[in-house]
Image (spheres, helix red, strand yellow):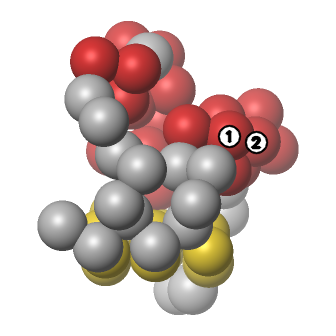
Amino acid sequence: ITGVLFVNTGYALRMYTSNLVRNYNVSSVKLVGLGGSTLDPKVDEYMTNSFPNANVSHGY
């Protein structure tokens, strides 16, 4: 998997609160697209840090 598109902000928040990403090797992910509504800065930082090789972008 090289891209994860259209992750809504509610799911991103769930990923943040559960710290789910740490259980997986996500080094191949190059793109993460987030959208749906505004994103808490802490969740944004978590997503950016959790996918270190990816361009994390926002749109809604």
**In this figure, which residue is indicated by the disc labeled 1?**
49
**In this figure, which residue is indicated by the disc labeled 2?**
45
Q: Nearer the viewer, residue 38 or 51?
A: 51
On screen, 21 above or below 28? above
Give percent across and percent down for residue 13: 47, 35
Give percent across and percent down for residue 28: 35, 61
**Crowding at mark 2 (Cα within 10 Å: few <14, some 14-19, many 20+):** few
Q: Is residue 58 left or right of residue 1?
A: right
Amino acid type, residue under disc 2 in the picture: Glu
**Crowding at mark 1 (Cα within 10 Å: few <14, some 14-19, many 20+):** few
Furthest residue to the bottom? 60
Task: Write the residue at 58% across / 60% down.
Answer: 53
**SS at mark 2?**
helix
> Which quarter of the figure has residue 4?
bottom left
Total marks placed: 2
Mark 1 and mark 2 in contact? Answer it, CB < 8 Å. yes
